[in-house]
Image (spheres, rainbow, N blue to C red):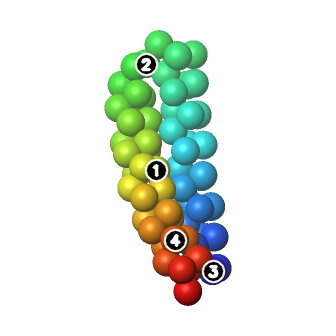
Amino acid sequence: MVEIHEKLIDMLNKQSSALSEIASAIDTNDYSKITTANEYLSEVRKIEREYVRELEKHVEQ
C-alpha cells in the first residue's frame, strides 16, 4: 500500500508542477512553458492510470 501511496504523491507533485508552469506561462507571456506543462500533465495521466490499476488490485485482494 505504501508504493501505491507514493505513486499518488508523485502524481500530485507533477500536477502541481504543471499548474505552476501554466501560471508562469501566463504571467510571463512565455507560452513555450505550456509545452512543459503538457508534458507534466501527460505524465500525470499515465501515473493516474497506474495508480488506479494498482489500487483496484489491492482492493480485490
Mark 2 vs 3: CB contact within 8 A: no
Q: Residue at x 40, y 27 (%)?
A: 34
Where is residue 44 drawn, in percent x and y?
Answer: 46, 50
> What kind of residue is marked 3?
Met
Tell me the SS state at disc 1.
helix
Measured Cα–Cα span from mark 1 to mark 3: 19 Å
Q: Nearer the viewer, mark 4 or mark 1?
A: 4
Mark 4 vs 2: CB contact within 8 A: no
Asked if residue 2 lies left or right of residue 22, the reply is right
Which residue bears the numbered disc 2? 30
Which residue bears the numbered disc 4? 56
Measured Cα–Cα span from mark 2 to mark 3: 40 Å
Count the labels in the image.
Answer: 4
Dividing the image into 4 quarters, which one contains the C terminus? Answer: bottom right
Q: Is residue 32 visible?
A: yes
Q: Nearer the viewer, mark 2 or mark 1?
A: 1
Quarter of the figure with residue 17: top right
For label 1, the crowd category at 10 Å Cα-Cα, with few meaning under 14, some 14 to 19 and many 20 or more, is many
Quarter of the figure with residue 20: top right
Which residue bears the numbered disc 3? 1
